[in-house]
Each structure stands twice: as C-alpha cells, then as structure tokens.
Amino acid sequence: MSPPQKSEESTGAAYICEAYELRITRRCLEDDLEYFGETPFEELEQHEIVKAFVKRRSDGPTNTREVAPLSSGKRVYRLSYGDRHRGATWYDERHRVVWLLGYAQHEFQSRGDAFPYFKELDADGRLLPGPADYEALLRGRDSRLQSEIGADAKRLLREARETPGREVVGILGGAVEVTVAVTSVESLAELHVAVQMVGLAKEHFVIALAALFEERDFEEIETAEAMPGRALRPGELGFRALLD
Amino acid sequence: MTVVVRLPEDVLASARQTGALKGRSAAEMVAEAWRQYLESHRDELAVEYEEAAELLRRGDGEALREFASRSVVERAEQAAEQVRE
C-alpha cells in the first residue's frame, strides 16, 4: 500500500502526515474515548490524548517506551499526556498508519493502571485494529485516489511529453506507483508505462491504466517486456500504446 | 466482485509455487502472477477498463470512488488478517 502524499492535515477520520497517517481504532474511539464512530478528527483533537497523539506521532511513528510484554508480540508504544492520560500506539508499517489503540487514565477504575488494561485488551484480541478499521482506512484512501488520479496522470503525461525519452516517476492518487516515458520515431509517438504491481488492488490498476492511456481503447494497449533503455524492475509490469 | 478479486490470489499461489522453484523474489512472483492474470482475463479487464475510462471522461467522482472500493471489504479483511499473522 502506498503512503499518503499530503503534508500534515486532518481529514475525516485521519490526520495525514507526510509518510503515514494517524488513526484511532473504532474500539478505542467508542469504548475508551467515548466518541461516536464518525466523529471528525478535528473534533477529536479536543481530547488531551489525541492532542498528544498528533503532537508526538506526527514527529515520528514510534517511541522508546513500550507497553510490554504483549500476547500479540507487537511493538506497542506508550503515549502520555500529563500525569493521568495514557495511550497505546502501534505503527502499522505495512499500511503506513500509526494507530491509537487504547486510552485510559492512570489509576482508573479498579485496574489500578492503564497499562494492564492495554495488555488485557491485547490478550483478548481487542487491542489491534480489525476489519472495520482497515475498511475505514482503505475507503479514505480510495476516496483520495479518485479525487487525485486524473490530475496526477495528466501532470505525469505532460512532463513525459515535454522530456521525450526520459522516465518520469510518480504515485497516482497516492496509491499507484508508475513510471512513464514517451518516445518518438519519425512522426509517431509512443507512451510507455511501468506499473509497480506489488500490493496493488486490481481496481486501482485498471483506473490508473485508464487515466494514463486516456483516449486509447484497451485493445490498443500492448504489454511490454521492458521500458525504453531498461528492463522492468521486480514487481513491475510494462505497457505501451501509440499516441495521437 | 469477490470472485474477481480472488482470481489473482489463485494465480498468485501458482506463481509463488513455480517462482520459489526458480529462486525468484516475491516481487517478481507478484508480477508474474499479474502477467498470467492479464493474459487469461483480458476480456474481463477490457470491460472494466472501458468502464473506468468512461467514469474518468465523465468526471463522475462518486461512481469512480465506488469502482475503486469494489473489493474494499475483502482488502480490509486481508489487512486485518495480516496484522494477526
């Protein structure tokens, strides 16, 4: 999965940093913070632990102090705000998200401390993000993909046309890593595209191809075994079609 | 749509098997699986390509978002499973 591309801002249920995003699991949001599931991040930032989450984890996705040992074996980090507010965060590097997994106040209820509570949740299989959390994450990214991919493809194509023979690299809609080059032989121009397929959803691949080859019918697009002047890299597939 | 999403996984499993025998990297195996999938599902992909192209031409953001999210439930389940591996 490709990283969010924008600089820091909160959008919907996420706070977008340069290389990853900050999110709160639904369980933490509803059970620990006592907010409704659809509460915008901007509003959540009123809460002390969310303020600390944004301030500390937008600087870097991890910490030095862990909540350990955990049954899941994950490296979950402590987050503190003042004397009482405690949180647990996990950097999901594969999906480029830092999750706020849990929140509790020190010496709360009868458990005596926030950290035994986090360990208990982990042992019960309730600490880490679940399918609903990932669905929210992926829907957010799909939404960004649809709004950005057209403009991203146009920009890459323009750059490739302006510098014939040279490769232009980009990430379309924050999700599809592509390399584009335009070559010319006499009056014919050809568009070459290499798409990095690792971790790519089929729908995103189809949209990216359609955005890059614009007016071309699918039958006009050929698969290519190489990019001009180089072999395909591991995980890449190559395509080409004549331009008008 | 579930069937469509699972097809590359089937192909991927076969590519992993042959790839492992040939000492290929995971990325090379993924690309090989996709190559096989594109060859065997060209007609199906052509239909989806034309649909996506039409949505882009029309600038129909909502329909394009729905298209992009067709396999989102399966992808989310897969992501959650990976967390627990």
Image: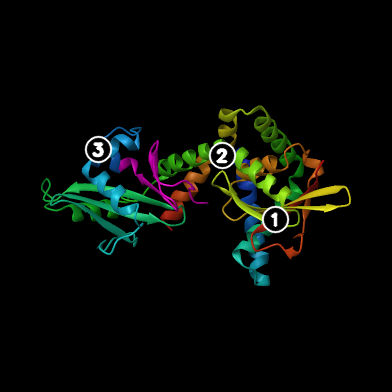
- Residue that badge 2 annotates: A148
Task: Residue B41: give x, y in percent of width and height.
Answer: 73, 45
Q: Which residue occupies 32% across, 51% down?
A: A125
Segment tinted magenta in the rendering: A2-27
Q: CA distance from mark 1 to mark 3?
A: 46 Å
- Residue that badge 1 annotates: A237
Three-letter amino acid code at the position of disc 2: Glu
**Element assignment for label 2:** helix
Q: Is residue A116 located in the magenta-colored stretch of the structure?
A: no
Q: Is residue A156 left or right of residue A76?
A: right
- Residue that badge 3 annotates: A46
Hey, which quadrant is residue B25 in on the image?
Answer: bottom right
Color scheme of the displayed model: rainbow
**Element assignment for label 1:** strand
Three-letter amino acid code at the position of disc 1: Leu
Three-letter amino acid code at the position of disc 3: Gln
Q: Is residue A208 left or right of residue A121?
A: right
Task: Residue B75: give x, y in percent of width and height.
Answer: 52, 45
Residue nearest the observer in this picture, A77 or A57: A57
